[in-house]
Image (cartoon, helix red, strand yellow):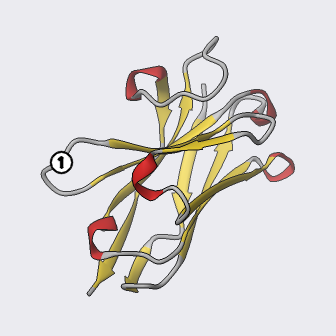
């Protein structure tokens, strides 16, 4: 089992930045990849990006260059740095851990078994 807790969301003006954190527990954190997703009101949950246990990353093209994922295996924490935020970035952001045996960079929701409770990000215009 993996438990995930996000933090760092809030209200920010357009053009601002936020850094989200996701603290993990329950399984050896350094052994698995992590993903970030987001869900805006009335929309499907969508892939933001992912990071392998070794630090390789991938992002959805829509926000490549504005968002950066990193991790600190010593702190069992993964981060999502978001810059140049836009009102359309308003959503609940979730971190996720993949199913056992699913290695590498995963972009599909169905590849993930463990989800945090989400943290709200609101970007005002």
Residue at (76, 34) in percent of width and height? 53
Residue 117 in sight: no
Per the image, the residue denoted by label 1 is: 43
In the rendered image, the quadrant that contains the N terminus is: top right
Q: Position of residue 3 (x, y in %)?
A: 58, 38
Q: Is residue 11 above or below residue 114?
A: below
Q: Residue at x 55, y 51 (%)?
A: 5
Q: Tag 1, which secondary structure?
A: loop
Name the residue at the left extreme.
42
Whether residue 97 is visible: yes
- Tell me the quadrant of the picture where the C terminus can be found: bottom left
The residue lying toward the viewer, choosing from 94 and 15, is 15
Q: How many marks?
A: 1
Q: Is residue 116 above or below residue 84?
A: above
Position of residue 105 measured from the top left corner of the image (x, y, whole percent): 61, 29
Q: Nearer the viewer, residue 76 or 49?
A: 49
Residue 98 horizontal/vertical position (percent): 56, 25
As drawn, which residue projects farthest toward the right? 74
Residue at the spot 66% in from the left edge and 44% down from the top edge: 24
Please tell me which residue is depicted at 34% across the width and 75% down the height of the picture: 86
Q: Is residue 28 left or right of residue 4?
A: right
Residue 108 shown left or right of residue 27 in the figure? left
Q: Position of residue 29 (x, y in %)?
A: 75, 35
Is 106 rendered above or below residue 67? above
Q: Within 10 angstroms of label 1, few (less than 14), some, or many (20 or more) residues? A: few
């Amino acid at each position: 089992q993996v438990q995930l807790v996000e933090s760092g969301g809030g209200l920010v003006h357009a053009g601002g930045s936020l850094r989200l954190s996701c603290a993990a527990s329950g399984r050896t954190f350094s052994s698995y990849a992590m993903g970030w997703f987001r869900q805006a009101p009335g929309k499907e949950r969508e892939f933001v990006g992912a990071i392998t246990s070794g630090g390789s990353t991938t992002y959805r093209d829509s926000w490549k260059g504005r968002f950066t994922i990193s991790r600190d295996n010593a702190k069992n924490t993964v981060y999502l740095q978001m810059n140049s935020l836009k009102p359309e970035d308003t959503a609940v952001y979730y971190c996720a851990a993949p199913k056992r045996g699913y290695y590498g960079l995963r972009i599909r929701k169905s590849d993930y078994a463990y989800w945090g409770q989400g943290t709200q990000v609101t970007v005002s215009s």
